[in-house]
Image (cartoon, grey):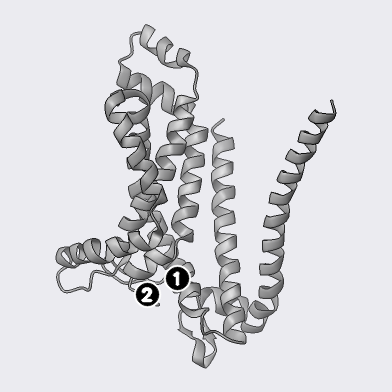
Amino acid sequence: MLKERFFQGLFALSAGFSIFAVGAIALFLFFNAFATISQIGFLEFIFGMDWYPDEEIFGIFPMIVGSIYVTALAIALGVPIGVLSAVYLAYFCPKGLKKIIMPAVELLGAIPSVVYGFFGLVIVVPLVSNIFDGVSGKSILAASLILAIMVLPTIILVSKVAIEALPKSYYEGALALGASPERTVFFAIVPAAKSGILASVILGVGRAIGEAMAVIMVAGNQVQIPHSLSDGVRTLTTNIVLEMGYAADLHKDVLIANAVVLFVFILIINISFSALKRGKK
């Protein structure tokens, strides 16, 4: 009994520490950013089109749009490939081949982001430049392709676990009713595992929108509203990384406010996916 209470307390302490960490980060960000946003003006800060720190002009709307475009395209590319890969590994992949693919997927998740960025700079950027003749190649498309590759391990591994966690009776029952293995998986197994698959998508979105190093190397870092896939763009995360090293006074406070916008952005995405998951139950 004493041992059970000890471990219950330990587990509760661990959970409480996680909550405390999130709360402390949120409190720090909002406390430091509130006065800065009030000084600049909320509408001018969020919807401002110009970013000139030397002149104390701070508008982050182009970076908000850039973050949305890059993340949305990366998820649109990565989620179908990731979920289909998870389905293949869970039900259709031969055991011998699976022993090769699974370590490769896990290794893909362990590669540092700077290596992804270097790969994008050497391979993807010239490829995009050849596709869109006359552009540098550092663009939304290049950044999205790299991020799509980076989110694949998370989506594949989490979706695979969710699919394999279902009782075998789901699969066997559908087969007994006359469904083909493919129809069974896509119309019985995948819908039943949608909660875990949505969780993998949430984690993938968090990885994509929070990535900075790889995006810095391939996105072009231009503060503008992009009008095509070949346009350069700067995201919220790259803006912080690029300028925090030399920022001071109001400029530094504005970058903290930039982090608050990113925090709220991720929070809204998580709440939206959670609501969607509850709505489908």
- Residue 221 marker: 2
Dots 1, 2 in contact, CB < 8 A: yes
Secondary element at tag 2: loop
Secondary element at tag 1: helix
Position of the C terminus, as image quadrant, is top right
Q: Viewed as shown, does residue 113 lie left or right of 266?
A: left
Q: Is residue 38 above or below residue 259?
A: below
Judging by the rendered image, the residue that carries numbered circle 1 is: 238
Q: Residue at x 40, y 60 (%)?
A: 113
Q: Residue at x 70, y 68 (%)?
A: 28
Nearer to the camera, 92 or 226 = 92
Q: Is residue 25 above or below residue 175?
A: below
Residue type, mark 1 in image? Thr
Which residue, as the protein is rendered here, is positioned at the far bottom?
Answer: 55
First in residue order: circle 1 vs circle 2 = 2
Which residue, as the protein is rendered here, is positioned at the far right?
Answer: 2
Spot occupied by residue 170 in the image (x, y as percentages of width and height)? 45, 16
Is residue 226 visible to us here?
A: no
Spot occupied by residue 79 in the image (x, y as percentages of width and height)? 38, 44
Per the model, the C-alpha gap separating discs 1 and 2 is 8 Å
Nearer to the camera, 224 or 97 = 97
User: Dividing the picture into quarters, in which one does residue 274 lie?
Assistant: top right
Residue type, mark 2 in image? Asn
Is residue 190 visible to us here?
A: yes
Spot occupied by residue 139 in the image (x, y as percentages of width and height)? 30, 68
Q: Residue at x 51, y 34 (%)?
A: 196
Q: Residue at x 42, y 32 (%)?
A: 160
Q: Is residue 153 above or below residue 119?
A: above
